[in-house]
Image (cartoon, rainbow, N blue to C red):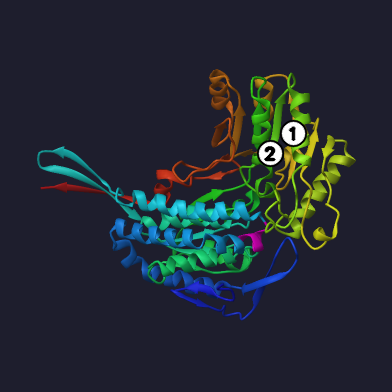
Amino acid sequence: MIAMRMLIDGEFIESSSKETIGIKNPATGEFIDSVPLGNSDDVGRAVDAAEKAFDDWSAMVPRERGKILFKAAQIVRERARGLAEILTSEQGKPYKEARDEVLGFANVLEYYNGISASLQGGFVPLASDRYCMVLKQPVGVCGAIIPWNVPAILMGWKVGPALVTGNTMVLKPSSTSPLTDLSLASILTEAGLPKGVLNVVTGHGQAVGEPLVTNSKVRKISFTGSTETGMRIKELTSGSLKRITLELGGSDPMIVCDDVDIDTAVEGAVRGRFYNCGQTCTAVKRLFVFESIAEEYIRKLSSRISGLKVGNGMNKDVDIGPLNNYDQREKMISQMKRVRENNEGIVVTGGKIPEGPQYDNGFFYTPTLVRDVIKDSVLLKEEVFGPILPVVVVKDLDEAIELANDTRYGLGASVWTRDIKKATYATARLQSGIVWINQHTKAPADVPFGGIKDSGLGRENGLDSLYEYQEIKTVMVNV
């Protein structure tokens, strides 16, 4: 464990403020560690270290940079159990989900190592004595801001493409789940990452995030979090031309057509909604089911949801852990209060804090199913970042698509059907950056990830993510 320290210029040090943030287990309320309460001075030191490291790191052959990422991935795989325990203890998710996430981080680094040898520019012949070279060069110092819901995998999404293309980085983890990111940064350092290439400053958004975003030496910002904070970042960078990638909120629709295997679609909704206690940007947040199968589908879905076991993520038989923090659970309570007071739907199961001494000190909330949700319900108009699933019965695919698009968000959507024509029709009309067919939430490192409308700007993952971290230089040669 490397708590009480930030990573700046290759060393784990305390903040100049000498103050700390306590980290608590969201399942038990138990204090588990603390990290420095960073400030703008710490950000400045980290950015300066990244700037100093840039020339040597960017001059390194891409394949050599990739080897360091691969070695780090190997170490992560060897220590996956301990890293997963850290992640569960600070974030709350079940141990199996935490282990899968840690291994996902390793997979991302392995992917970028795999393509490192292929990073190259281009050659364009213009005439017998003239040609053009197209060079792809790193942007410079990059900033990354990581949320608390999936801190390991999102760190990989930002660190992997940034470092393999020769950039250096200053990373700000969430103030409620920073220990996993600090541990992974330590492993990258152990794997041979030169000092100053990756720096981690812990602290709150206003004290650390804003100075990082506004620092003139930082040429790119990659942020994952709420749409409101993303808008704030866009505002803060409006006076400059630095690049920004914003992966923001979502209210993903899942459309269940009448030709599906009902049991398969039920399992898809359960996994898509209640993974990580519903705290995922691409979780199923609105479910639209054809009326001809609605009663059978809702009955089976209710039975499956009511059987999910809620508890401490370290217990092997737990399906859903707690919400990450007090404020997050209060949002669930507030949204369900509005549903009941305004008759916005019928609560089929859940909708309350579970009872029992094992739940007294944690941020638990029962997995909830609400049917017959009205069009203007808070569950459809706002992002619900927790274990609540609203269901709307629709006549046909056109009605489902119309309601699915009736949102400010446009991150992901899924269509469940055996008919390729229906899938093709819906895919063309759904307003989202990602469309899944007969699956939901899958986001491999190989493919671009991102949204439209108020769900963000730019793309992460795949070859598209490399463009976000590279400048194009055209060289015209006359011999």
The first of marks 1 and 2 along the sequence is: 2
> Magenta: predominant secondary structure element?
helix
Q: Residue drawn at (55%, 40%), measured in percent from left and top?
A: 442
Q: Is residue 405 visible?
A: no
Q: Nearer the viewer, residue 439 or 283?
A: 439
Q: Residue drawn at (70%, 64%), measured in percent from left and top?
A: 25
Number of numbered discs: 2
Disc number placed over residue 301 in the picture, else none: 1
* Label 1 CA crowd tier, 10 Å (few <14, some 14–19, many 20+): many
Please tell me whether mark 2 sits on a helix, a strand or a loop: helix
Q: Is residue 38 above or below residue 146?
A: below
Q: Amino acid at mark 2?
A: Val
Magenta highlight range: 87-92
Q: Is residue 241 above or below residue 24?
A: above
Q: Residue furthest right?
A: 341
Disc number placed over residue 270 in the picture, else none: 2
Q: CA distance from mark 1 to mark 2?
A: 8 Å
Estimate the x, y position of residue 43 in percent, counting from the top left: 52, 70
* Label 2 CA crowd tier, 10 Å (few <14, some 14–19, many 20+): many
Estimate the x, y position of residue 22 in percent, counting from the top left: 68, 72
Drawn side of residue 128 relative to residue 9, left or right: left
Q: Are the residues at dot 1 and dot 2 in contact (C-beta closer than 8 Å)?
A: yes
Q: Amino acid at mark 1?
A: Leu
